Image (spheres, helix red, strand yellow):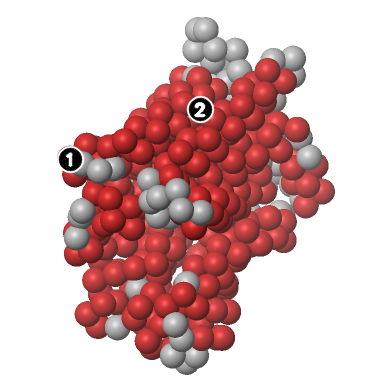
Amino acid sequence: MPLALLALAVVTFGIGTTEFATMGLLPQIADGVGVSVPHAGNLVSAYALGVVVGAPVLTGIGARVPHKRLLLLLTGLFVVGNTASALAPDFGLLFAARFLAGLPHGALFGVGAVVASRLVAPDRAARAVSRVFLGLTVANIVGVPAGTALGQHLGWRYAYCAVAVIGLVALAALALLVPHQPRGPQAGIRQELRAMGNRQVFIGLATAVVGFGGFFAVYSYLVPMLTHLTGISDSSTTLVLALYGVGMTAGTLAAGPLTDRALRPTLYAGIVLLAAALVTFYFTVHSTIPALVTVTFIGAVGALITTPVQMLLMINAKDAPTMAAASNHSAFNLANAAGAWLGGLVVAAGWGWAAPSLVGAALALAGLALAVTGGVLDRGDRPSKVVASQGAPVPAPAPATGTSDRNHG
């Protein structure tokens, strides 16, 4: 695997840290800008809104910009957004700064995934993409706990300063390690928008929103579930979330080679295992060891879904995969919002803290139905192609024996 993938992973490490550390610092932030903790929670929504808006808009604006230059510009915007977050004097400006910090999130993941897939042979593209995603999972193990601890001891502004420094390191690494990848003559906003109209791209994004909504229905309420039902102390929840990150890292490592071998079977299996794990958690959440084992497994199978969805979108977007790849992360943030909302509804209705697990399982099964529908419709289509950095089309790798959909568009 090329060293350039490390530079891309540093970017996603910074993204994961800034996205999730805010949740752990809401009391400190609320006190610092003079608002209530629930009101400060709107900062999480501001970042998510930035992701949803920024992914298609920024990739559209940069449709003709060479990928390396676009990565540098987006990372620079990431640094500016987090620096502005650290310096914001009041809640209004902090809200705007978090929106700004979220704008490059999806575009960085999308462009990074396309760049990574072109650094290796076609039959190793998913492994390369999964290495980029590793930065996000490692952030849940190291970056988020470290950023939270830094913010709690020195002040929340220092946490955002640290993320800005990570962004500067990523900027230098991208400049030194990522090779130039010119856009082909077919590049442009019209081609990107046409690719977004592909029915398989639409179904893939819908699968991400609905299926991964099941993951977030539980993740959003994991801490209160563990404290109210499992009996884990507040001080120990950070370690449990790190354990969750360990599971996500293991799932991401497995997802790459499995997706290269058989894309749709990996996606189907991941969603089925996620639904089964969420149902299991409904019963194991009352016992410490079984609950922790299940939490780790949920993290693993949740991460197992991300790489095949990303590759599915890139393959079916054909000659213009960047906007589709970036929009995947808009879909994940919509899944975050939808899962959290539906999980909160059943808790508010008095069904108990374990109920979001069943909501999550139902969403996962609905996502499976969408994925299978896409697979059935896919069978009659012609093979897709992923465009190489020089602009020449490279056929997608052939599937392993017994799978006929790896290269179908």
Which three-letter amino acid code belongs to the residue tagged 1? Ile
Rendered image: mark on residue 181: none
Q: Along the horizontal axis of the image, is 395 left or right of 192? A: left
Is residue 194 visible to us here? Answer: yes
Disc 2 target residue? 267
Front-most of residues 229 and 380? 229
Cα separation between marks 2 and 1: 28 Å
Residue most extreme to the front? 350
Q: Residue at x 64, y 30 (%)?
A: 370
Placement of 290 over or under 111, stated as above or below: above
Placement of 52 over or under 33, stated as above or below: above
Q: Residue at x 64, y 41 (%)?
A: 205
Which three-letter amino acid code belongs to the residue tagged 2? Leu
Point out residue 321 in the picture as x, y percentages from the top left corner. 66, 41
Placement of 197 over or under 173, stated as above or below: above
Task: Count numbered badges in the picture.
Answer: 2
Q: Of the residues under marks 2 and 1, which one precedes in the sequence?
A: 2
Disc 1 target residue? 289
